[in-house]
Amino acid sequence: MKPHVARILYPSIVAIVLLTLWQGIVTGFKLPPYLVPSPILMLQTLVTDWQALGLALLFTLKITLFSFLTAVVVGVLISFVFVQSRLVETALFPYAVLLQVTPIVAVAPLIIIWVKNPTASLVICATLVALFPIISNTTLGLRSIDPDLQSYFAMNRANRLQMLFRLRVPSALPYFFGGLRISSGLALIGAVVAEFVAGTGGSSTGLAYQILFAGYQLNIPRMFAALLLISLTGVALFVLMAWLSKLALGSWHASELSRD
């Protein structure tokens, strides 16, 4: 069996088994929908409530993508600065770690108060969550260069920009794309958590608000449908990042050429 077929087939079989088991338990034990809805009821709710859930998905996806792109741009620029000087990296890297270990739920209320625009405040909160993997992975990749190649570039009197873009950046690409896979999921998590903290209402609301609203109404099938959309969005982002990694590295890097 071809590897790309196996990567789709095997997880699909596991998903079918788990969904069948879930449906069987709910039906066999006659669990009420307000406790655990069946997969069929969840999918039915997803169809019937698609107008509200679809708009909420678009809003959450917008926050996620804006946050992810901002984290990528800011993270790469910070990594470029770090790699130019060990002194700068030593002085500032602990503050990047501080962003990672500080719970977003602790700082999100302050950001929402300081930034009057609701969308901008949500983007900032989600960006803080997604930023560290880009900084950490890209900086590590920019540092992980072949010493012999570095000596060769120095022997040919390459300047800092030539060293950066012709040696360090190609060496850092596998680490960078690894950071993208992590950061894309964290951007989604940050967007959802920020929406929970903001608790915004009205028409411009995301999936987190739909979950909260469904919880208040004890509409558990709708809550599960919103959770399903969040999970599928996270999987889609990971697959997209993996595809971009394959597209950029597939023809030359060992991580993509390996057949194991």
Image (cartoon, rainbow, N blue to C red):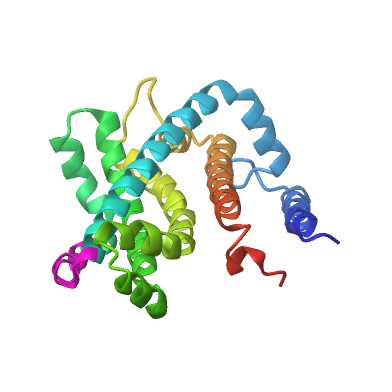
Q: Which residues are magenta?
A: 84-96
Question: Is 92 covered by the magenta stretch?
Answer: yes
Q: Is residue 135 visible?
A: no
* Nearer to me, 18 or 157: 157
Vertical comparison of 225 with 93: above or below: above
- Residue 69, position as x, y percentages in the image: 38, 42
Magenta span dominant secondary structure: helix
Report which quarter residue 93 is drawn in: bottom left
Q: Is residue 139 visible?
A: yes
The count of marks equals 0
Vertical comparison of 229 with 77: above or below: above
Q: Residue at x 70, y 43 (%)?
A: 39
Q: Is residue 69 left or right of residue 173?
A: left
* Nearer to me, 100 or 228: 100
* Nearer to me, 140 or 179: 140
As drawn, the residue found furthest toward the right would be 1
Query: The N terminus is located in which quarter?
Result: bottom right
Q: Is residue 255 left or right of residue 9?
A: left
Q: Is residue 58 left or right of residue 198?
A: right
* Nearer to me, 174 or 20: 174
- Residue 59, position as x, y percentages in the image: 43, 29
As drawn, the residue found furthest toward the front would be 156
Report which quarter residue 90 is drawn in: bottom left
